[in-house]
Every structure is written in C-alpha cells, then in structure tokens.
Amino acid sequence: MTQFLQALINGTSLAAIYGLIALGFVIIYKSTQVLNFAQPALMLLGAYWVVYFATIIGWPFWAAVLMAAGLAALTGVLVERTALRPMVGKPVFAVAIMTIGLNTVITVVALDLLGVETRQVGDPWGLKFFQLGSLNIAHRQVAAIVAAVILVAALLAFFKYSRFGLAMRAAAFDQEVALTQGVSVTAVFAASWAIASVLAMVGGLLIGATPPGLDRSAGVVALKALPVVVIGGLDSIAGALVGALVVGIAEALTTTYQPIHAEFLGRNFAQVVPYLVMFLVLLVRPYGLFGTKEVERV
Amino acid sequence: MKNRPGLIGDYRADSAIFRNNVQRFWIVVLLVAAVVLGLGGTIPLIPGLIDFSMRGELLILGVSALFASIGAIGLNIVTGYAGQVSLGHAFFLGLGAFTAAVLGGTEVTRQVFDLATGQNVEKTVLVGYGLDMALWLPAAGIVAALAGLIISPVAFRLRGLYLAFVTLGLVFLGEHFFRESETLTGGVGIGRETGIPKLFGFRFDQPGEVFGVFMTKPQKLFFLGLILLVVMALVAKNLARSRIGRALAGVRDRDIAAEMMGINLARYKMIAFVVSSFYAGIAGALLYSAIGRLEPASFNLLLSIRYIAMILIGGAATIAGSIMGAFFITFLPRIVRWMAGLWFFGFISTSPAGGFVTASQFEQIMFGGLIVGFLIFEPLGLYGIWIRVRNYWKAWPFSY
C-alpha cells in the first residue's frame, strides 16, 4: 500500500510537469490552430536561462526565474512573429511540420548553450524531503504540484475574468468574428505563444530540479507532453490536466511495478508507457477524452 | 496533332510516365550520366572549366542517397499522395534493417558458464541465419509491410494530426522494442552486423570483376542501388498514375468527398500504408547493409524527420521530388562542410569544439531552417523550383 501511495505521489508530481508543458500546447492550439512541436525546444531554452542567471551569474533563484520567464515570453513572441505569422492560413499539417523544423533549430542553440554536462538550476529545494506516515515526499515534488496548481488557477482566472482573456477565448472561438469585434488577433497569437513558452520554461525548471538535473535528454521528457494533450483532446484545457494525471500516474505505477511483475517488457519501459496509453485511448476515442469531435460539412 | 508534339490530347498521354520527348531525353541523359559516374568517369559540366566525378566519399554518399530515395518514395506514397502524415517512417526503416540483419547476418554465440550443470554451454548472443539477399531483401519489405498492415486500421479511425501523434508514438514504442530485444538487435551502443549483401553468391560488399570490369565495393552497391531505384520508382510512378493513385489523391484532397464517390477509405489507406512500409523496409535493409553495422538507437524521431524533410524539400506527391530531396538531404553534411571552407561562413568551425557553431550543429540548423523556409516560400519543394525555372525559360523572352 505504501508503495502504491508513493507511486501516486511521484506520479502526481510528474503530472504537474507534464501538465504545464501540455497546457502550453493546448493554449497555442486553441488560439492559433498550430500544433507546436517546438515546445521541447522552448522548454530547454527557458530552463537554460534559469541555469544561466541562477548558477552562472549567481542571482537569487527567484530573480533568475522571473528574468527567465521574461526571456522565455520574448522568445515565444519572436518565434511567433518571425516563423509562424507567415504561415497563417496554411494547412495545419504544414505548420506542424514547420514547428518540427523550428524545434531542431532552437534545440541546437539551447544545447550549445547548455553544454555537455548536467546542469543544476540552483533551486532551493535540493534533495530535501519530509516524511508523511511512511511516505517520503521530496520538497521539489510539493513545489512542482504547488507551482502547477497556482499557474493553472491563475491562467483559468485570467481566461475567465480578464478582458484580454475574454479576447483570447473569442479569438479561439472564431478569429474573424473576434476581429470584427475589435479584438487584436495578432496580439492574441503573440500572447498565447508567450504564455506557452513561459509554461514550458517552468516545466523545464521543474525537470531541472529533479535529480540528476538538466541535461540533453530533457527534451525527451518534454515530448511526453504530446501523448498528454492527445489523451486529453487537443483543444481541451481540462483534458490536458486529466491527460497529465493519467500519463504521470501510469508512468509512476509502471516504474514501481513493471520491473517486478512484467520484467520481460524490458528496462525503462515506463518511458514508453505514455505512448502506449495514447494508443489505447485513441483507439477507443479518436478525438481524445475531452476533445471536440470534428464536424465537417461536405 | 503530329506537328505539335507538346500537345496532350487524351488521358493516355496525360497520364503517361514521361509526357513528352524532352523528359524522355533527359531521363536517358541522367541515367547515362549516373552509369558513367558510377564507373568512375568524369562528366564535364562546363567543358574545360567544371568537371564532376564521384569517387571515394562522394560515391559512398551517392550509394546512401540512392537507397534513401527508395525510403523517401515510400514516405511520399503515404504522406504525399495519400495525405496521411506519418512520423513513423523510422520504425518501418528499422524493422526492415533488423529483419535483414537477422535473416542475412551471421549468428554470434558465446561460451557461458551454466550454474546448474557447472559446465560451459553455447549461448546465442545474436540470432542470424546467413540467408541470401534474394531472401532477406523481400522479407525485410514484407515484415515492414505487415507492420504497416497492422497500423492501418488505426489510420482509418484517426485523421490528420491525431494520426501524426500515433505514428510518433510508434517510433518511441519501436525504439524501445529495438533496444530491448537484444538477441535480435545487439542492444544500445553495441548494435550488430547487418545482412551480407550477396545475391546468389555474388558479393556486393567485396571488390571484384563484373562483366570484365573491375569494381570496388561502393561501385557495386551504387549499381545495385541504381537498378533497384529505377525499378521501385517506376512501380511507384505506375501506382500513382493508375486507379489507386487517383483514389489516394482523392483521399488526400477531401476524404469525405472521396468516400461519397465510392472510394473505400479503409482499403486505400491500408494500401498506402502497406506499400509505403514495404518501401521503407527495403530502404532500411539496403541502407544499413551498405554501411555494415546498425544500432537500435538510430531509429529515432530524428530519422523520421529526416525523411519528412526529404519529401518536403524535394516536393510532396512527386516521385522525382522524393529522389531530389533524398539526394539533397544525404549530401547536406558534405555541402555544409564545403560551405565552412568559404570565407563568409567563417563562423562555422570544422573542429568539434571551436568557433561559434560547429559544422554538425550548423547542419542541424540548416536542416530545420530548410524545412521552415521551403514551407513558407516554396511548398512544392525543389520540384516546384524546377517547374518555375522551366516555365520561365519556356516563355523566354516574355517571361514575367
């Protein structure tokens, strides 16, 4: 039982990381109809800024995070303006492939900056943990869950209550109608890329806080946000969160139980579980758990 | 009609493989040039000024490009012609490569101390049957095609982006499978020897006399690649211009409308996936048997993206474009190294640790940048550029 609960907690903190990155995907997809495969690269670059300001320059951690968030937002806006704006109105697939190209370019830059060694993000949580009954809960796990909850709540409140949030929802619903009502759709595009980039950066920061730290393989972790959004449905924020929980917990449970009960599946099987879950969900529900079914007029 | 050879008057002429004599002429010129280059000859591009020959490293790259072309044609069938985005091409390439390695490779055994009996026993480390290429090459295609057959019901249920995701997952699941089945693949970082390219006792991987001409290993492989590519390209072209190709184009352009006109979506998506995977399997088997070694970690998402880049840069839904793209992407590292030698690209460093960017990093950036650039400026790819250039000169001097 302890083992099971421990796996649940590990899974939830994983889910927090996946959820943040996945939320970025969904926000970009909803407001610009672009599937952003460049999210892993944005994550790496964002996390690098934290590494740079917190450990290389030696700023206080929170100042470094704020600065990194600013730079991440700027990167998002720049990418949208230079690469995505010319593609408005092109087929969805072409744009998606283009973000793969972008991902390659940005990843090379980020990895070049990051270097070959494993980097620490200079977070205050370290390897400390506290005990709850017989469970070991690391500070960073709590931090991940708290950060995710706060960010998600803030974003939902922003979409629901603020004027610009309403504008973003309007643009997501129908760009042309939103335009005629005076919504600046270009500002919405820029904002959604900025938000997604910052979310990716926070995700990267949390990955970097997980031992052993931030290294070249972090992009693979960020890619797992793809099955998360697909399981939830590409255009559903709630779906992304549910998907993150499903994937995170499935992965943690596999890490705990598969080496004992199903050893034949091989080492590191947990790493591919998200994709397996995605397969199964898509076979039953082709548009994910909460995705809108496409209705087409012929 | 006789006096106007360029006029296309009926459907037969419109759907011919080569639509006019100019195309027929140039294809013959290209083939002759390829044969001359393969034999080690030199072609004067501008007589007396620029010569072109393929020797040493260039010829080896040429061999890879020929085999990669087969894979690119395969991806173009499913993604270009049928419009089903597949990011899973690396998985099918890997299946082909490993099938070839298992069937055509040699068995490796090791003495292992058995605790139960206290004696050394022979244990198989790597499975290999040492079969002939006439067996392993088709088998590689068929195994990959079977995998494609299993995937196609999923493709029937899903559309567009969701399909792209599933095929993406396929790459990761496949990579895991390749990593873990160590007796078949050798395991990560170790890999294994590939199938030996010997056809009815004729070795492609050793230098020797062919019809009285001495040929090196790359030369032999070059001609193998050339012949196979011509055959596979013709088959694909015929598929694309026949009933199946038209049905696939219908599925791509508007699947609902195609279904209304009596095209069985499940059937044609299945055909597209099976044929595409077959091509990928053949290409994977050949590519790695030319290199001689393969490693499970190389069949990752990056490889899939390379092939996507080939058909995007070459031109989607064209056979000639697939070949152009495959050649371009295969020769890209070489082009980048040539660029690094020019003064205005002085920021590219040829040593792995110096300069602003290293050559391999710059290659990656070029690679991403080319995908982005082609999608923004020339969605038809190199093929589209060729069409534009041709039309410009066709109408010259009134080309505006």
Image (tube, coloured by chain):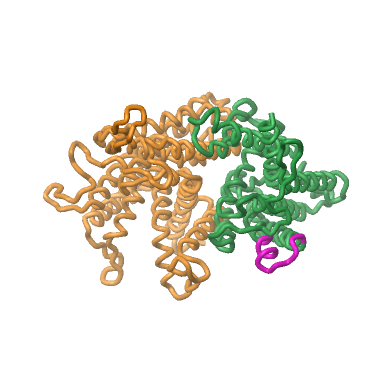
**Residue A240 in sight:** no
Where is residue B198? Give x, y as percent: 22, 40
**A148 sits left or right of B265 in the view:** right
Secondary structure mostly taken by the magenta-highlighted segment of the chain: helix
Residue lying at the far bottom of the rendered structure: B343
Q: Residue B77 appears in which quarter of the rendering?
A: top left
- Extent of the magenta region: A49-62
Q: Is residue B273 covered in magenta?
A: no
Q: Is residue A57 covered in magenta?
A: yes
Chain that is green in the image: A
**B235 sits left or right of B159 in the view:** left
Please, is residue A46 above or below residue A268 in the view?
below
Chain that is orange in the image: B
**B387 sits left or right of A126 in the view:** left
Where is residue B69? Give x, y as percent: 38, 46
Please, is residue A43 above or below residue A277 in the view?
below
* Quadrant occupied by the C terminus of chain A: top right
Q: Which residue is drawn at 59% across and 60% down?
A: A110
Residue lying at the far left of the rendered structure: B212
* Quadrant occupied by the N terminus of chain A: top right
Q: Residue B339 appears in which quarter of the rendering?
A: bottom left
What count of labels does the image hold?
A: 0
Where is residue B281? Give x, y as percent: 38, 37
Q: Residue at x 40, y 43 (%)?
A: B71
**Residue A205 in sight:** yes
**B345 sits left or right of B218 in the view:** right
* Closer-to-camera residue (A258/A216): A258
Where is residue A35? Give x, y as percent: 64, 45
* Closer-to-camera residue (B373/B64): B64
